[in-house]
Amino acid sequence: MLRKIFKSMIVARQASASYEAMRYMTNCQLDDIGFTRDNYIEGIKARISAELDAEDAKAMSAAPAKINLHATA
């Protein structure tokens, strides 16, 4: 649960920073990176969420599994 809250805070902060950056970018600059003013913030939020999800998946796959090696009869 804390991880979800932390992730939400990161995505929200990145959206705010993206909005501020977009204010200083021209439409041509946005087009060069593959965005428009309409989809820039949502696109950045999607990228950040995907990066955080990939990190979570990597961390989960790297976590050692607890295996019961004792055989019971």
Image: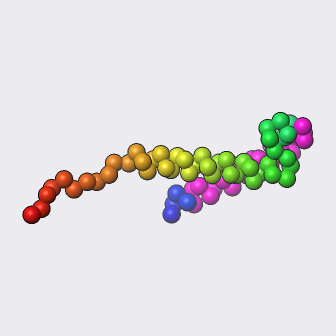
- Whether residue 13 can be seen here: no
Determine whether, in the image, residue 21 is placed left or right of residue 54: right
Report the residue at 67% width, 47% height from top: 47
- Whether residue 58 can be seen here: yes
Which quadrant holds residue 22?
Answer: top right
Q: What main secondary structure does the magenta stretch of the protein show? A: helix
Residue that extends furthest to the front in the rendered view of this protein: 73
Instruction: Judge whether 36 appears above or below 5 on screen.
Output: above
Where residue 36 sits: x, y (%)?
85, 47
Please tell me whether residue 27 belongs to the stretch shown in magenta: yes
Q: How is the image coloured?
A: rainbow
Report the residue at 69% width, 55% height from top: 12
Determine whether, in the image, residue 22 is placed left or right of residue 55: right
In depth, the one of 11 and 58 nearer the eye is 58
Report the residue at 80% width, 41% height from top: 34
In depth, the one of 64 and 9 nearer the eye is 64
Report the residue at 81% width, 44% height from top: 35
What is the tally of numbered marks visible in this picture?
0
Please tell me whether residue 69 belongs to the stretch shown in magenta: no
Residue range in magenta is 5-28
Where residue 15 sits: x, y (%)?
73, 52
Residue that extends furthest to the left in the rendered view of this protein: 73
Where residue 3 sits: x, y (%)?
52, 57
Determine whether, in the image, residue 46 is placed left or right of residue 7: right
Where residue 73 sits: x, y (%)?
9, 63
Determine whether, in the image, residue 28 is placed left or right of residue 41: right
